[in-house]
Image (spheres, helix red, strand yellow):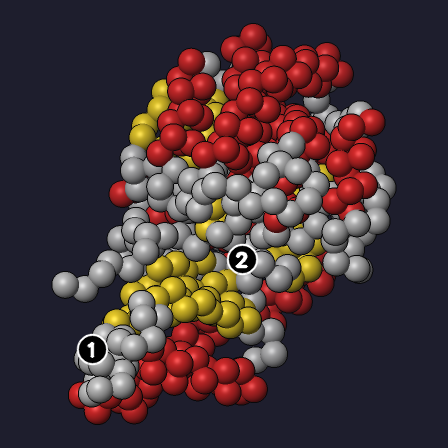
Amino acid sequence: MKSRLRTALFSFSALLAPTPALAEPLADADRKEILAEVDRGSPAMARNALQIWSWAEVGFQETKSSGLLQKDLKAAGFKVAAGVAGMPTAFIASYRNGDGPVIGILAEYDALPGLAQAAEPERRVIDGIAGHACGHNLFGAASVAAAIATKNWMVAHGIKGELRVYGAPAEEGGSGKVFLVRSGLTKDVSAMLHWHAGDGYSAMQGHALANVSAKFRFHGLASHAAAAPERGRSALDGVEAMDNMVNMMREHVPQETRIHYVITDGGKAPNVVPDTAEVYYYVRHPDQQQVADIMERVKKAAEGAALGTGTTVEYDQIGGTFDLLPNDTLGHMMYDNLKQVPLPTYTVEEQAFIDKIATTLPKGGRKQVSGVAPYSSGEIMSASTDVGDVSYTTPTAGLSTGTWVPGTPPHSWQAVAASGASIGTKGAEVASKTLALTAAQLFQSPETLAAAKKELDERRGADFVYHSLLGDKAPSLDYRKAPAAKN
């Protein structure tokens, strides 16, 4: 695998290189027709997005959310294969008209645990175990709406090729797309498109952080914490000893590294020495090999903690994702189409919602959205995504749109609130239109697809062979479920 330095140098040169020649733009009549198709489908898109928001299903448990999107795609004439790549909530929907390019659109729909929040501009916890704090309810609904609009245009004009929607569950830690790639379900895709909720409008093509995640389960001996402490061996001691060692290790890892954890099981009562405990770790770095190496050191810390506390430990890898590989050939096309889409205007009520949330945000965020951000490429972003594995095997480009109040941190209650409100669905409509315009243009741009494939080959290196960071591990379908009680 090529070094991070090589990738960084290529990214820097991409920033300095002239803009690639764009394919012929869509005819004005086609552009207007596609935008009108999205407009016709926008009420349904908004209903779907808000329905998925209300269900707030976590990774690999998105049964209703996945089913709703599949139902709409089937009704629109797509053939749907459900439960693909060993994931019951994953699907592939396809419309094909003869031979031609295969254009894919990614869809996500999982929520985050612990963030149940009303669609209101102040903190109000509601019943539920999760919330759409990363806007995946909008992501899935808008991607499906874009695909339906594109398909209708293809039918009307006899456009040759295949359009696919990849329903990808468990992006938040479960690495759903990795299993799609590993199963070979994306290998014939000519170009893959995606988007994400955000607090502004951008078609920046950047690198994400590679990521390996795992749960460490410690086992000890239960005993009365006061009457017979010498007979116990605390699994929680094992977790805390491990955490202390990893925290000391932070001084001795590459500075770009991010390590974070939560204790998901620490015992049930203070007067019982816990015989089981669990801690859930993420390790991130811009380079895949560095991530794997650092996680090996974390595993050694767990083994040492178990030895020192008289416990045992089990390692269960949950996720593993590559960094994101930019593709400027596709990115410039996405950017050009984003600039062709009118940005939302807001009602008095929506503006009041925005202004109220703005007062609750941490200082330092953007104060207002000022159109589409200038195009850029190669920046290393501080988050991870399983789109990374897709981008190393298929030419891939994405965008983000203003579904949240400017300055909103992802994975916050403010993001949940906006993702369940009309300001969120208005931003998602911009994404849907941009995806549809870009997909339609690609169906008529074989030279762009060829250039995008050439760029992919150059960026990843001629000797690149894909090997998942998850190896041959099956999807961790129960990773969001509470640890089972020991009999």
Q: Quadrant of residue 36?
A: top right
Inspect the image, locate mark 1, and give the three-letter code of the amino acid beneath it.
Ala
Q: What kind of residue is marked 2?
A: Ser
Q: Going by the image, does 267 lie left or right of 189?
A: left
Q: Percent from the top left, x then y, of residue 94?
A: 41, 24
Q: What is the x, y in percent for residue 244?
A: 45, 84
Q: Nearer the viewer, residue 464 or 320?
A: 320
Residue 319 visible in the shown view:
yes
The residue closer to the viewer here, 401 or 102, is 401
In the figure, is residue 29 to the left or right of 412? right
Q: Which residue is mark 2?
A: 384
The crowd level at tag 2 (other Cα within 10 Å; few <14, some 14-19, many 20+) is: many
Residue located at (67% from left, 53% from top): 409
Tell me which residue sits at (75%, 36%) in the image.
353
| Disc 1: which residue | 222
Identified at 61% across, 52% down, the residue is 412
Give the image location of residue 196, x and y in percent.
Answer: 60, 42
User: Alpha-carbon distance for marks 1 and 2?
Assistant: 38 Å
Dot 1 alpha-carbon crowd within 10 angstroms: few under 14, some 14 to 19, many 20 or more: some
Tell which residue pokes out farthest to the left in this image.
Answer: 487
Q: Is residue 327 above or below residue 341?
A: below
Seen from this angle, which residue lies furthest top? Answer: 156
In this view, 449 is above or below 440: below
Tally of marks: 2
Q: In percent of the image, x 66 and y 16: which residue is there?
A: 39
Work out whether mark 1 precedes mark 2 in sequence or the reverse, and give the earlier one.
1
